[in-house]
Image (cartoon, rainbow, N blue to C red):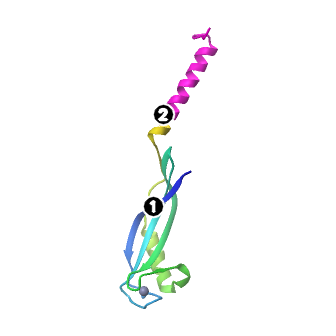
């Protein structure tokens, strides 16, 4: 019951020719990093992904269509991308859960050691 999202790290215009329409001013590459989220926390993963799109013919260019030139540029761009460090952020519900757990543990200890009794 979690969800995965991606946030944009970097967008770059390429001057390469599009493999579909041969225009040389439409290609854009987008680097994204994965984010997972559920009701307890929000976490940045180390997983990154990239997507290429041509705005001249409005087509997503998949890696199978890349030319050697495009591959070289992608490699170059990829080296310049700085992914965000992995991190995790707990949501209020998680803190409430932890607090509740602590309360139970404390009550059990107090009961076991005879500090409190229910009789
Ligand atoms: Zn195109």
Outermost residue toward the top in this view: 119
Specify the label residue 93 is tagged with: none
Q: Position of residue 58 (x, y in %)?
A: 41, 82
Q: Position of residue 2 (x, y in %)?
A: 54, 52
Mark 2 crowdedness (10 Å alpha carbons): few <14, some 14-19, many ≥20: few
Residue at image point 61% right, 15% down = 111
Rendered view: 63 above or below 101: below
Q: CA distance from mark 2 to mark 1?
A: 31 Å
Per the image, label 1 sits on a secondary structure element best described as: loop
The question of residue 109 being in magenta is answered with yes
Instruction: Count all numbered tags in the image, as a single digit.
Output: 2
The question of residue 113 being in magenta is answered with yes
Q: Quadrant of residue 116?
A: top right
Residue at image point 48% right, 59% down = 5
Q: Quadrant of residue 82?
A: bottom left
Mark 2, residue position: 96
Q: Which residues are magenta?
A: 96-119
Residue at image point 44% right, 39% down = 92
Residue at image point 38% right, 85% down = 56
Mark 1, residue position: 83
Is most of the magenta stretch helix, strand or loop?
Answer: helix
Per the image, label 2 sits on a secondary structure element best described as: helix
């Amino acid at each position: 019951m979690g969800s995965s999202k991606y946030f944009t790290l970097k967008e770059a215009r390429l001057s390469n020719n599009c493999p579909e329409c041969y225009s040389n001013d439409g290609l854009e590459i987008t680097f994204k990093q994965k984010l997972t989220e559920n009701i307890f926390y929000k976490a940045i993963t180390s997983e990154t992904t990239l997507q290429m799109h041509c705005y001249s013919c409005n087509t997503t260019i998949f890696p199978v269509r890349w030319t050697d030139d495009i591959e070289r540029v992608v490699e170059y761009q990829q080296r310049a991308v700085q992914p965000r460090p992995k991190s995790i952020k707990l949501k209020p519900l998680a803190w409430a859960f932890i607090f509740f757990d602590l309360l139970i543990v404390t009550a059990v200890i107090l009961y076991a050691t005879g500090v409190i009794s229910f009789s």
